[in-house]
Image: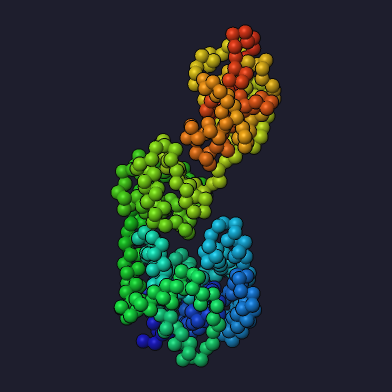
Amino acid sequence: MDLEDQVSAFINRHDMLRGEERVLIALSGGPDSVCLLLMLHALKTEYSLQLHAAYIDHGLRPEETPKERAFCADLCRHYDVTFHTESIKVKAHQEEYGTNLQEAARELRYQRFEEIAARIGAHRIALGHNLNDQAETFMMRLLRGSGPGGLTGIPPVRGHIIRPLMCLSREQIEGYLEQEGIAFVVDSSNEKDVYLRNRIRSQLMPVLTELNPNVLETFERTTEVMREEERYFGIQVTKAMMRLITRKTDDAIELFLSPLMTLDTVILRRVLRRAIDETRGLRGIGFTHVEDIIHLIRESDAGGRVHLPHGIRAIKKYATLLITAEPPVTLGEFTLEAGVSLPLPEVELLISATLHDTLPSEAEDDDTKHAAVFDADKVKFPLIVRSRRDGDFFYPRGFGKRKKLQDFFVDEKVPRDERGAVPVVASGDDIIWLAGYRASETAAPEDESKRFVLLKAELLRRGAGE
């Protein structure tokens, strides 16, 4: 069977094309993408395809890019393939999100292919991954500690993304191009051993091939079996998730804790990876991160948390586990007049201040978390409601001396990323209340006090203040 027949059979086996599709080819000018264009061009009539190709300038090799772009344009012109070229800013993306260079390039590249495909109405995006890429990806993820899901490797089909060359080795691809007399360009970054994939390619794969000449096929069979098992587990995870989710947004998902704690570890790992993936994505999330969350669920007290890559946090609450990529809340600055209620939607609280001629019953309660009474003649209105500031201090009631807010939060085990969300209520320059935690001795009522102000913090009812 020649290579074109082999690729056609692989396409049919995985139902990649059904005919009369518009296909966008990811074209870099390298041997894999050039072979991909030639193969799809050869199958163009059989599948009634409309072919487009896109070259993406990553802005990383300005001395090589013009030559590559011109080569790709000429290739497309020769084979009557509509050519598109666009640029992405990889280094800026890397700096903004803190990813490595290759990861940033991949994320932006896929995003741009999706945008072009949407613009031209492409039904499929074809990528040139091959058997060597599959083996290298498997080893790279294994070395980084990926779980079974990561070891499924690169799928031949994912949504509308297809990889028709996943049945061919790099040697077969380059041999085919040499036989056909087709040139290609070489990306110099593929020769640098600073990248893990390149080191696996140049140093590890030759050793594995010596031990097992059929190592590429072995990796492909292994990943295929693991993909089939993951599909089964995926069904079980979907069933589990249906009874676990209590709240979900674009950047956060909250799961009921009790049923989560009873799950078998095999399913629990997959549930957590699904939750993370729906929150922000699994890029940079390794097996050890998931194990840390399992330890959080089973061993930590309420309020414990695990920090993951890309700003994701797993927080154990009393009844739920929250996985969120939402940035920690920091309150702005607001004024609070007597007789007024101040909604704080960011922290779901309603702060109110009311004046009284007699001592409110709340003054008898030593717990000043949610309500606190002060001498109205010692309080300066309007009160200021804000977040903490460097150097803040107050005089906690019952403590007897001054205390820095920083030290108070540490003693109260307030997580660092939640401290900016604690409402600090100040009268002039003096902090008189940390809403939800403790009142200050400052402006506390005394026996001779004649007027009183009651501060309360209540949960903000949905729709209040809107």
The residue lying toward the viewer, choosing from 440 and 269, is 440
In the displayed structure, would residue 422 be above or below residue 115? above
In the displayed structure, would residue 284 be above or below residue 410? below
**What's the residue at 52%, 88% (across, down)?**
182
The residue lying toward the viewer, choosing from 466 and 123, is 466
- Given the current orientation, which residue lies at the most extreme front position? 401
The residue lying toward the viewer, choosing from 390 and 326, is 390
**What's the residue at 31%, 50% (across, down)?**
265
Instruction: State the quadrant of the C terminus.
Output: top right
Q: Position of residue 381 (x, y in %)?
A: 69, 22
Q: Position of residue 94 (x, y in %)?
A: 58, 61
Q: Is residue 129 visible?
A: yes
Q: Position of residue 85 (x, y in %)?
A: 62, 74
Q: Is residue 41 visible?
A: no
Give the side of residue 339 with respect to residue 299, left or right.
right
Residue 321: quadrant of the picture: top left
In the displayed structure, would residue 145 be above or below residue 263? below
The residue lying toward the viewer, choosing from 325 and 162, is 325
**What's the residue at 62%, 27% (across, down)?**
431
Instruction: State the quadrant of the N terminus.
Output: bottom left
